[in-house]
Amino acid sequence: MKKKIFNALLSIVLILCLFVLIVFRSTGSSGLWKTHLVLITPVSVSGDLVLHSLDSVNITGVVSSSSAFKELYPSFFPVTVYFSKEASSVYFTDKDKNCSLYYIPREFESQLRTAKKNSQFSFDFFLDTDQKIPPVSFISSLLIGIFLIIISKNKRIFLSLAFPSFIFAACFPELSLLPPIICLLYIAYYIQKKYGRKYILISFTSHTPVILLSLFTLILLLFAPINTLIFIPVLLCSSAAGFFLMHSFLLFVDNKKRFVPVLIFSSLFQKKEGKLLPLIFVPASLSIVLCIVFMLFYTGFSSERGGAVLPSPAKVSKDPSFSYESYEKCLEKSQEIPTLSHYVSDSWNSAVFPYIRVNSHVFDLHIPFKTTAGITRFSKNGSSIKSYYETLFTFDNTFIDSILKGIDNSNTAGIEQVLLGQNTFTPVEYKPVAGSTGSIKSLIILSISCMFFFMLMFISHRRTYSIKDHA
């Protein structure tokens, strides 16, 4: 009775884990900006046509090159402007100026897709969220799994351990997750190989490939995306539940047999194992090499779309804030594209210009913390007149907040609202629309993983000959 309850609980755990992986799957790009979608059209499409078409389906709050721009300085101010209308125009075209960009609040995504589906617009367009990651990771892991299941003796044990990994690869297709999935598949292969033999745990503690695979998996998971890393325990739980369910089933089958052989690790078994070792890592190495080639040449779009390189937020600290520290870091990392930090600097320079000396450094981009500006006032004290300095402005977090509140409360839609939606001062850089498929981080992880599996092939080859020598 207890076994039935235990197996029922394991079945529930397995189903729930697989359900969680499927429901919370990641099927493509979530877009470049947190609060806005980027609508991309050929540069030949008239801006008035795009805005009129969006307005016809009740899409409002669109930020475009024709949106009203708040000039921070009167034209007669001899001040360097960092966040000017001309400088911020880079947000409305791609790097090669082949496409026009429009920023649309995310709440209108369903209306936009419905209009596109029903061909309500007379122009062609696509969104930054249209990028779908191809199932390269799933196909690679599936092919490796098929190879391993063919050479496995305990195929049911291997399948019970590996099946959740296939589901995970299908639900989270990021290429940076392929190497840890492959490692888990090979660990499952070694478990099935030694299943049913005595002293399995002892053999694993001295089994070099298993130790290296386990350590390398842990290292790779340290660099996995946070939004995916939380599902790794779910994957491991589902694999464990599947294994114990299959183990219980095999025990039930064995109990009906009159004779069940007990397997041991003989020298003959080790010789047979050694002959196969150098070959089993060949599919892993080849699949990762092919994925690297795929990353280097794949764009994800047709030729006219694949070249779109757009202004995009760079990665920032995981603790978003509009503090002076994040303002300063944003300026340090910013290059050719003006950011919200530039807007704040312009706001400060505009505010303090009437109150500073003509020869002062009013054009500074980087404003030191606690910088002050004010005027000299005079007061009569008896028969004498004394002067004193009155501080009118202090560049601190309070001043920064006042500028950002002004943006938030503005009645006009500008690129500042898009930048404000990032919830921190964010450096902006050019990125390809299909950047989610071929990031530098993924390329590095795949390259290191490729070298790792080649190293395992070499170690296995050496182990084969050492087994022969001791035989």
Image (cartoon, grey):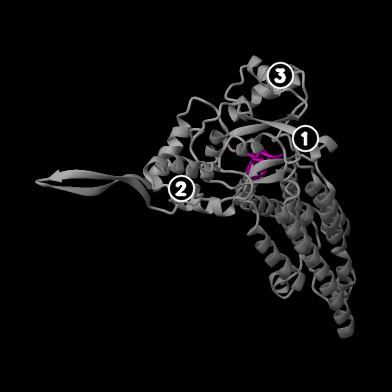
Q: Amino acid at mark 1?
A: Asn
From the viewer's perspective, is residue 350 above or below residue 182?
above
For marks 1 and 3, give the CA distance: 17 Å
Q: Earlier in the sequence, mark 1 or mark 2?
A: 1
Q: Earlier in the sequence, mark 1 or mark 3?
A: 3
Residue under numbered circle 2:
362
Residue under numbered circle 1:
98
Furthest residue toward bottom:
470
Residue 29 is covered by the magenta coloring = yes
Residue 372 appears left or right of 201: left
Q: Earlier in the sequence, mark 2 or mark 3?
A: 3
Residues in magenta, as a range: 16-33
Helix, strand or loop at label 3? It is: helix
Q: Nearer the viewer, mark 2 or mark 3?
A: 2
Closest to the observer: 206 or 199? Answer: 206
For marks 2 and 3, give the CA distance: 42 Å
Q: Residues within 10 Å of mark 3 (few under 14, many from 20)?
A: few
Q: Nearer the viewer, mark 1 or mark 2?
A: 2
